[in-house]
Structures are given as C-alpha cells and as structure tokens.
Image: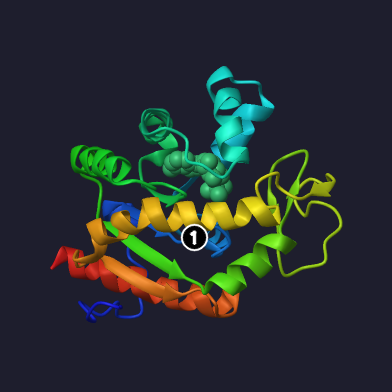
Amino acid sequence: MQRGPGRPAQGNRFPVNEMGLNVIMMGPPGAGKGTQAGRLARERGLLKISTGDILREAIREGDPVAVEAKARMDRGELVDDETMITIVTNRLLRPDARRGFVLDGFPRTVAQAEALDRIVTERKNGPLIVVDVEVPQHELVRRLAMRRICVKCGVNADPFGSAETCPKCGGGLEQRTDDNDEVVLDRLNVYKRATTPVLEYYRERPTFRVVNGAQAPERVAHELDTMIDDAAGAQRV
Ligand code: AMP
C-alpha cells in the first residue's frame, strides 16, 4: 500500500546537506534491497549499512562474536538483538554516518526497530523513511539460487549478470552458504515471522512506502527516488 502524495518533490532531490536523510530498506532476502541501498547511498552521499555484510566481514576477520553468530546465519536464523543493536549503534556513531544512512537488513525485529527509533530521535538529523521492497516468493527463490558472492571482498555479484569474477576486486565467486535451496526457504519463513511485525510497526507512519521490487532494477530505482523525496517532504510539512 502506497501512502498519499504528500508534498511534491518539485524536481529536486531532498537536500541531505541541509538536514540529513535516513532510509530503511525493508524486504525479504533476494528483494534487491542491497543493490538499491548501495545506489541510493552513493548518489545521495549517505552511509550504507548492511548488517549481513558487516557480519560476514567480521567472520572473515575472525571476530569471536561474529564467528559465534555464523552457525545461526548458516541455518538462516536471526542473530540476537543485543549483538545487532550494538553493531548498528557503533556504526552510526562514526563521523561518516553524520549526514544520514541507508540501512539494509536492519531492523529485523520490533526490538531492533524500537532501538533504532531511540537512536534517530537522539541524533535529530532528518526524517526516517521506511521502504518495503515487495517481490513474490517464487521470484525470490529464483534470484537467490542465482546469487553469487565474492570470496575475497564479500560483494554480491549482480544476480542478473553472467559475471564469473567479482566486478569490484576480480576475486572468485561462490554461492553464499545460506543461499542454498533448503536454507533459502527457512530464511523466507524467518523473514515473514520475525519481520512482518516490524512492517506493522512502521506501516501507519507518513514516511512508510512500498515499492514493487519485481520490476527491472532501473524502474525500481526511479520509483524509489520519487518515493523518498515525497516521503521526506511529507515529514517536513
Ligand atoms: P543478509 O545478508 O541481510 O541476508 O543477512 C544474513 C544473515 O545475517 C541473516 O540471515 C541473519 O542470520 C544475520 N542478520 C543480518 N542482519 C540481521 C539483523 N538485523 N538481525 C538478526 N540477524 C541478522
């Protein structure tokens, strides 16, 4: 369900240098939210925070908390709220988060959403916009089966492309340990169970939007940009 039009964007991107902008990309695994979050963050000078990427990097570096979390990740289960809230709180304290953020993979529970609200209220740097990227389950399963990740830098390779090496660092590609058929269905179920209440938590806010993620990535990007400018305007009225 898309909210009313709010204030028109008047052809201008929301000026993040004036106020800051914070975006949460919600959506199941494979919805393309990571790709859109990366683009949005680059284009608007915001910090992209992907909690899955942070965990995978910490595992590669041998961080003991992350290594302990790996078993849960491999089973498609959620890592505990305390660990996740600490990771995001610490990341948001760093100077490169000052202008705002695009969150990918967080919050996944209502406790995480409540913690994030407290942080955003304290920071006072612009609206919090929540976008739900909707994609039918059969399309998610198809995309996740094709997804490859770089063994060296952890970047996701374009699921629609035919790359044989990482487009960023040239490293080899492999399937994520949690992208195999069995775990994928578990992850989609976990998403539905744990994260549907989070969508309900946000749904009535004037800054909540839904985008159809089954469209071509450029089309999703275009709609997302319009929605974010519109939602940012709605929040300022
Ligand atoms: P992702 O790359 O976002 O699909 O995340 C991969 C895995 O990391 C998830 O299946 C969870 O096990 C864990 N994870 C990432 N973000 C969170 C979060 N916000 N809360 C709990 N677990 C998370």
x then y, percent, for residue 67: 61, 24
- The quarter of the picture where the C terminus appears is bottom left
Residue at screen point 60% across, 41% down: 75
Determine which quarter of the picture holds residue 163: bottom right
- The quarter of the picture where the N terminus appears is bottom left
Q: Is residue 219 left or right of residue 205?
A: right
Q: Is residue 108 left or right of residue 128?
A: right
What type is the residue that disc 1 sits on?
Pro
Query: Looking at the picture, does residue 119 appear above or below residue 190?
Result: above
x then y, percent, for residue 221: 51, 72
Determine which quarter of the picture holds residue 116: top left
x then y, percent, for residue 70: 60, 31
x then y, percent, for residue 119: 25, 38
Query: Looking at the picture, does residue 129 appear above or below residue 175?
Result: below
Q: Secondary structure at mark 1?
A: loop
Query: Looking at the picture, does residue 139 appear above or below residue 69?
Result: below
In front: 212, or 219? 212
Residue at screen point 74% across, 63% down: 146
In front: 147, or 122? 147
Residue at screen point 79% across, 51% down: 166
Asked if residue 157 can be seen in this view, the reply is: yes
Question: Which residue has dot 1 on it?
Answer: 28
